Image (spheres, grey):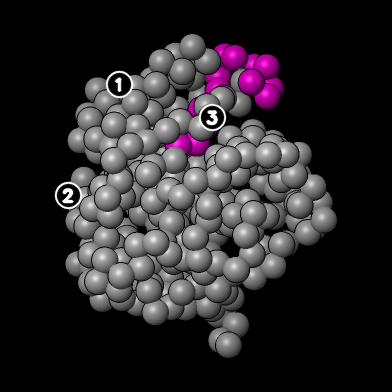
Amino acid sequence: MDPLNIRKPAVAGQFYSSSGAGLRSEIKAYAPEEALRQDVIACMLPHAGYKYSANVAVQTVSHINIRSKVILLGPNHTGFGSSFSIMTEGLWQTPLGEVKIDSYLAKKILSNSKYLEDDNLAHTYEHSLEVEIPILQYFRTDFEIVPIVFLSDDKKALLDVGSEIAVVIKELNIQDSVLLVASSDMTHYEPQAQAQRKDKEAIDAILELNEDKLMERILELNISMCGHAPVITMIKAAKALGARAGRLIKYQTSGDVTKDMDSVVGYAGVVIY
């Protein structure tokens, strides 16, 4: 395989442990001994350093029957690459092993999209998808991924991409094999009580599967939710695939960990089914 298509970890040793044993132990510390797993169409997970957000992410994933194909949707924090970037070939490495890109599915989505571009650069240093993969690997090892990141927050385009993804999934008749994962943190660097109030408004819109309301709340309340773009795409695709409801698994802030309540970041884990 072309080594250019092997995506190396960018934040191992920073956001999470760089050793396999250390990473497994790190995730295990947050995993409940027993959790009732359900079939879901989609979920939203946070993507900060594990110290701050893994409790939410791991608890959420522990409630999900992870499917064999995972479409990862995240924000592009780095600014590298195109506005709508999909990676269609190769492997992603983590300390827990390698995960293969589902090239067939990725290329089908790419060919059906007016917006997506095949672009490895956007993914090379971006952490928003990377940090989700080891948590998924902890609970299931035999899945493939389709990585997509967004620089744009053009609502029409985001909704169109969601529709395009759903069309491909339905055309291939793989609805029962695909899990959509949207990666997003919530309010950034505001006092705890204020962050909680704002985040509740955004979370309520997500649980209602109302992407219009989510965008309205973000604009009206100036909610600094970094992954609202992928969440909007995820909601649109999930509804097209039959989603009817959402459930909040866990919410907390960095203040719950650091005890600094003056400037926190919010984290929410949601499942959609």
Residue 256 quadrant:
top right
| Callout 3 amino acid | Lys
| Callout 2 amino acid | Lys
Judging by the rendered image, the residue that carries numbered circle 2 is 156
Viewer-side residue, 124 vs 129: 129
Viewer-side residue, 227 vs 241: 241
- For the residues labelled 2 and 3, say whether their Cβ atoms are less than 8 Å apart: no
- Earlier along the polypeptide chain: callout 2 or callout 3? 2
Secondary structure of the residue carrying numbered label 2: helix
| Callout 1 amino acid | Leu
Closest to the camera, between mark 2 and mark 3, is 3
- Give the residues drawn in magenta, as a range: 256-270
Q: CA distance from mark 3 to mark 1?
A: 22 Å
Judging by the rendered image, the residue that carries numbered circle 3 is 250
Query: Callout 2: few (<14), some (14-19), or many (20+) C-alpha neighbours within 10 Å?
Result: few
Secondary structure of the residue carrying numbered label 1: helix
Judging by the rendered image, the residue that carries numbered circle 1 is 221
